[in-house]
Amino acid sequence: NKLEIIPSNYNEDTMTNLLSKINLSALKSGAKDIGENIDNLPDEITTNNEIDSNILQKLHYLLFDIHIIDGSLICPESGRRFPIKDSIPNMLLHEDEI
């Protein structure tokens, strides 16, 4: 995978509001696949407890600052690879997959 890190503006309120929408296990799996250290991320996040600012910043970094330029997405159910070229994933199915 070819990655590019493009820093974006961090907003703690925005990240706090996004917490309930994040599929943390999927995010951690994807981050691990591209070689990101996820050791400091919890196994689950509940919105009724205080989340450490460092965790919010790490989530922001994973969600908004890492851009995959070239590589592939792999479907966890079928194992099918979808290529990413110039940051654009090609998710079109072949005729025999429709």
Image (cartoon, grey):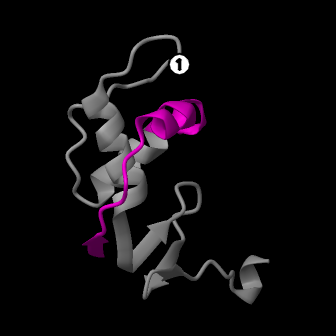
User: Is 96 displayed left or right of 22 in the figure?
Assistant: right
Q: Count the numbered circles shown.
A: 1
The image position of residue 89, as x and y in percent, is 53, 78
Instruction: Name the quarter where the C terminus is drawn.
Output: bottom right
On screen, residue 86 above or below 58? below
The image position of residue 65, as x and y in percent, is 34, 60
Instruction: Name the quarter where the N terminus is drawn.
Output: bottom left
Measuring 43% from the left and 23% from the top, which residue is drawn there?
44
Span highlighted in magenta in the image: 1-24
On screen, residue 97 above or below 56? below
The image position of residue 10, as x and y in percent, is 37, 47
Residue 87 magenta: no
Foreground of the two, 35 or 22: 22
The image quadrant of residue 18 is: top right
Measuring 47% from the left and 38% from the top, which residue is drawn there?
15
Residue 1 shows in this picture = no
